[in-house]
Image (cartoon, grey):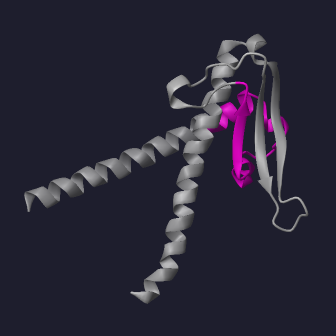
Amino acid sequence: MSSALDRLKNLTNKISSYEMARKENLKVLRNLFSEIGIDKKVEVFEDIFSFKAINLSGASLLAENLGEIKEGKYLQILAISYDKDAAVKSKNISLAYFGRVENVDTLLKDKVVEFIIRYRFEKSFMTLEHYYGMLEDFKTYE
């Protein structure tokens, strides 16, 4: 019994820490949204989550070399929109352009990388909630 109770406590703590991390992440993400100028292209913060994805050119997003610049490239934030009714289904949209990555201030580059990672963190929660909701439809088959 103690083992089951301990597992429940651990699970509760983990869920609670994820929710706290998510709340803090959204607060910082909202600040970065304005700070790096995404608000110039997307007026409403919540609208960034309507994109299928947001990518970065000019710097690495891989864990093993996060933020490492790619010489000769341009630092740019690209959003991918998707319209199932359009002739061309997906479209890349530039959300921010910062110039040649080797000329961009390191602090700004780091904030851009942080924005992308924080966006993806929140987007993953939204995806999880979406599929969790879809699974509700299958409960009638149990």
Q: Residue shown at 68%/20% (left/top)? A: 109
- What residue do we see at 91% from left, 63% from top? 87
Q: Vertically, is 55 above or below 88?
A: above
Hey, which quadrant is residue 99 in on the image?
Answer: top right
Left or right relative to 16: residue 72: right
Point out residue 91 in the picture as x, y percentages from the top left corner.
Answer: 84, 50
Corner quadrant of residue 100: top right
Quadrant of image for the C terminus: bottom left
Residue 121 lies within the magenta run = no
Identify which residue, 13 or 96, lies in the foreground: 96
Image quarter (top left, top right, bottom left or bottom right) of the N terminus: bottom left
Please tell me whether residue 47 belongs to the stretch shown in magenta.
yes
| Residue 21 drawn at (x, y percent) | 46, 41
In the picture, measured across the screen, residue 26 lies left or right of residue 15, that is right
Against 1, residue 15 (above or below) is above
x, y (%) of residue 3? 11, 56
Q: Which residues are magenta?
A: 29-58
Q: In this rendering, would 53 be left or right of 72?
A: left
User: Residue extending furthest bottom?
Assistant: 141
